[in-house]
Image: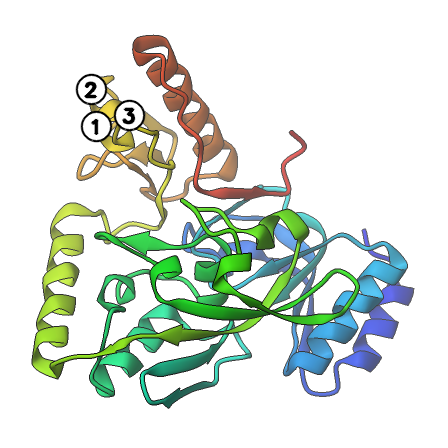
C-alpha cells in the first residue's frame, strides 16, 4: 500500500484535479472488471500530470496511465500503485485547414466526429474505436483497413525524465499494434492528424456503413476490451479460435463470444482471473491444434505473472 506521506504530497500538487483512494478499476475499464487501485488520480491539466509523474518517480511509486480503459484487464486484486487517468482531461480539439490537433484524452470517436463536421476524410475507420487519442497513438489503433499511422503527422509526448518532445510520425515506429511510446514509456499529450477534403455526405455514409458492420459482427452488447488477440501473420485470430471449436467457450462469467470468436466478453460477473484463464486456454488450444501463437492485444495490469 502507498504510504499516507506520499498521498499528502500528491494532494498538494492537485489544486484542481482529484485523488481517490482504493478506487475500483471496474468503474474505469470497458471490461467492467478490476479491483481497487491504491490511488486513482485525475489531473486537471498538464502541469498536474507532470507533477504527479515526477513525484511518483521521485518516491518510487509504481504508476500506470489509463485513458478510456478500453484495452485493459485489471486483476481482481487491483493495482498497488497510482493510476493516472487522462481520459478526464486533455480533451481539446481544434482544426486548421486539413489538420486536426487533439489532446490525448479526447475520445477517438469525438475526433472523428470533428473531422466529419469539417468535411475532412480519412478518419472514418476510427469513428467506432472506443478509446482515447492517446491510446490510439500508443498502439497504432486501426480498423477496416485504416490505421493511425496513415493519418498522424506527429505526437507530443512526455518522457520519463519529464522532457516534452514532439515526435514526427517517422520517429514513432508505428507498426501493427506497436509504437516506440510503449518501449520508452512515453506519455502522449497530444497529436496532429492530417486528413483530406471530402464530401460530408460520403464521409457520413462511410461512418454509418462501418458502424453497421460493427453492430452486425461484434458483441457490442457485452463488456469487452475489443479484439482480444493480435492478428497472427497469415491468419485471422477469430477464425483460428472458431476452427478450434471454441466459439461460446465459457469460464465462469467470461466467454468467447458466440457472435465473433475474436472477442472475449464479460457475460456478467466475470472475474479478471476467469478472463485470463480463458485467454490462456484459447492460446493453448490454438497452439496445439494449429501451431500458431496468439498474442493478447489486451494489456493486463496488476497480475503477479
| Front residue of this view, candidates 55 and 21 | 55
Quadrant of image for the C terminus: top right
Q: Are marks 2 and 1 in contact (CB under 8 Å)?
A: yes
Provide the secondary structure element on which disc 1 rests: helix
Sequence-wise, the earlier of marks 2 and 3 is: 2
Res. 249 mark: 3
Residue drawn at (45%, 24%) of the image: 280
Res. 243 mark: 2
Q: Label 3 to label 1, Cα distance in Å?
A: 14 Å
Residue 67, position as x, y percentages in the image: 52, 64
Q: Residues within 10 Å of mark 3 (few under 14, many from 20)?
A: some
| Front residue of this view, candidates 298 and 255 | 298
| Nearer mark to the viewer, of 2 and 3 | 2
Q: How many marks?
A: 3
Q: Label 2 to label 1, Cα distance in Å?
A: 6 Å
Residue 245, position as x, y percentages in the image: 22, 18
Q: Disc 1 marks which residue? A: 239
Amino acid at each position: 500500500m502507498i504510504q499516507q506521506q506520499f498521498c499528502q504530497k500528491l494532494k498538494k500538487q492537485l489544486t484542481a484535479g482529484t485523488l481517490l483512494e482504493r478506487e475500483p478499476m471496474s468503474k474505469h475499464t470497458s471490461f467492467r472488471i478490476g479491483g481497487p487501485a491504491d490511488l486513482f488520480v485525475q489531473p486537471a491539466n498538464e502541469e498536474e500530470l507532470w507533477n504527479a509523474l515526477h513525484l511518483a518517480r521521485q518516491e518510487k511509486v509504481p504508476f500506470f496511465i489509463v485513458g478510456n480503459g478500453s484495452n485493459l484487464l485489471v486483476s481482481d486484486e487491483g493495482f498497488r500503485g497510482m493510476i493516472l487517468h487522462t481520459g478526464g482531461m486533455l480533451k481539446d480539439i481544434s482544426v486548421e485547414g486539413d489538420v486536426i490537433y487533439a489532446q490525448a484524452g479526447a475520445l477517438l470517436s469525438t475526433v472523428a466526429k470533428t473531422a466529419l463536421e469539417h468535411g475532412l476524410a480519412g478518419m472514418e475507420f476510427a469513428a467506432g474505436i472506443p478509446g482515447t487519442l492517446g491510446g490510439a497513438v500508443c498502439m497504432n489503433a486501426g480498423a477496416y483497413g485504416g490505421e493511425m499511422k496513415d493519418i498522424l503527422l506527429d505526437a507530443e509526448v512526455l518522457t520519463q525524465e519529464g522532457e516534452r518532445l514532439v515526435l514526427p510520425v517517422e520517429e514513432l515506429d508505428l507498426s501493427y499494434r506497436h509504437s516506440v511510446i510503449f518501449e520508452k514509456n512515453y506519455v502522449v499529450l497530444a497529436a496532429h492528424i492530417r486528413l483530406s477534403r471530402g464530401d460530408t455526405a460520403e464521409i457520413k455514409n462511410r461512418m454509418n456503413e462501418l458502424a453497421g458492420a460493427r453492430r452486425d459482427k461484434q458483441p457490442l452488447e457485452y463488456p469487452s476490451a475489443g479484439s482480444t488477440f493480435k492478428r497472427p501473420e497469415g491468419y485471422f485470430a477469430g477464425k483460428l479460435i472458431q476452427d478450434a471449436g471454441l466459439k461460446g467457450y465459457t469460464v465462469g462469467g467470461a466467454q468467447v463470444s458466440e457472435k465473433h470468436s475474436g472477442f472475449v466478453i464479460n457475460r456478467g460477473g466475470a472475474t479478471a482471473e476467469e478472463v485470463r484463464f480463458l485467454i490462456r486456454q484459447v492460446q493453448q488450444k490454438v497452439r496445439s491444434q494449429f501451431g500458431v501463437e496468439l498474442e493478447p492485444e489486451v494489456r493486463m495490469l496488476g497480475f503477479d505473472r
